[in-house]
Image: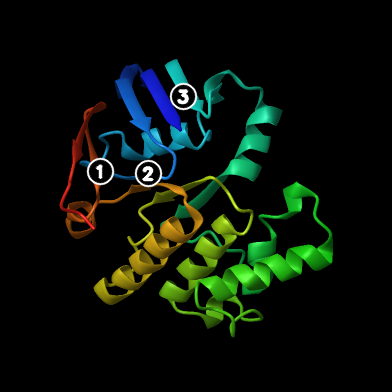
Amino acid sequence: MYELRGVTKRYQRGKETVDALRGVDLTVEDGGRLVIQGPTGGGKSTLLQMLGGLDRPTSGSVHLDGTDLAALSEAKLTKVRSEKIGFVFQSFNLIPTLTAQENVETALVPLGLKVAERRERAAEALKSVGLGERLTHLPSEMSGGQQQRVAIARALVKNPKVLLADEPTGNLDESMRDEIMDVLETQWKEHGLTFIMVTHDSAIARKAPRLATIRKGLISVSENVSAA
């Protein structure tokens, strides 16, 4: 479970101080699904970075399963990210010279697994997102939707507890958007993940069971009981 209490984040932009987050309180239960929406510059991606341990708050606490991520050493924080948190980004972030299978395997290297086990788990992860016949393809040989499926497989191959997605459909057309959302929702349900996603897409936000809206660093959360 995530528990954020009084999370603030301030940046210096020249002589100006920017408050990206201003006293955010948020709880996300295990297995929950939360969509984060708001205007550009409102603090969405900053909040996701706090949840993923990619950045530290100026003040406040970010607890994951009772551990304050903001208080961990860099080494311990890296360990939490490598074991518990999977990330999916808008830009896919695939290594262009590696095959789909090799890209997925990169997530397993920090876990110290043997090569044969890495290959097997990467192949299974790609099969689970419908890419079982694309193991040896390079990113340049795949469509945008297929590349994002590889990125999802890479995020999930280590069996994380949490999946964080930052605009994962932002570079895709409407049909590919729906396909990727189907993949993400299926994985969330099958693996019991805590799934938190940033999006500017109102069509996706309307279907979310829980929606957090951030404006000028302030957050409000609403429940959608009619969402599937």
- The three-letter amino acid code for the residue at tag 1 is Arg
Which comes sooner in the sequence, label 2 or label 1? 2
Mark in the foreground, 1 or 3: 1
Which of 24 and 160 lies nearest the eye of the viewer?
160
Q: Can residue 19 be seen in this view?
A: no
Report which residue position mark 1 lands on.
Answer: 210
Which residue reaches farthest bottom?
133
Q: Residue 150, image x and y in percent?
A: 54, 68
Mark 2 is surrounded, within 10 Å at the Cα level, by few (under 14), some (14 to 19) or many (20 or more) other residues, namely some
Report which residue position mark 2 lands on.
Answer: 32
Mark 3 is surrounded, within 10 Å at the Cα level, by few (under 14), some (14 to 19) or many (20 or more) other residues, namely many
Given contact means CB atoms under 8 Å apart, are the residues at marks 2 and 1 in contact? yes
Q: Residue 24, image x and y in percent?
A: 31, 22
User: Is 60 above or below relative to 221?
Assistant: above
The residue depicted at 63 percent of the width and 36 percent of the height is 80
62 sits left or right of 104 in the view: left
The residue depicted at 25 percent of the width and 34 percent of the height is 42
Which of 100 and 133 lies nearest the eye of the viewer?
133
User: Is 24 above or below relative to 193?
Assistant: above
- The three-letter amino acid code for the residue at tag 3 is Val
- The three-letter amino acid code for the residue at tag 2 is Gly
Q: Residue 145, image x and y in percent?
A: 42, 73
40 sits left or right of 53 in the view: left
| Quarter of the view holding residue 99 | bottom right
Report which residue position mark 3 lands on.
Answer: 62
Q: Quadrant where the C terminus lies? A: bottom left
Which of 37 and 96 lies nearest the eye of the viewer?
37
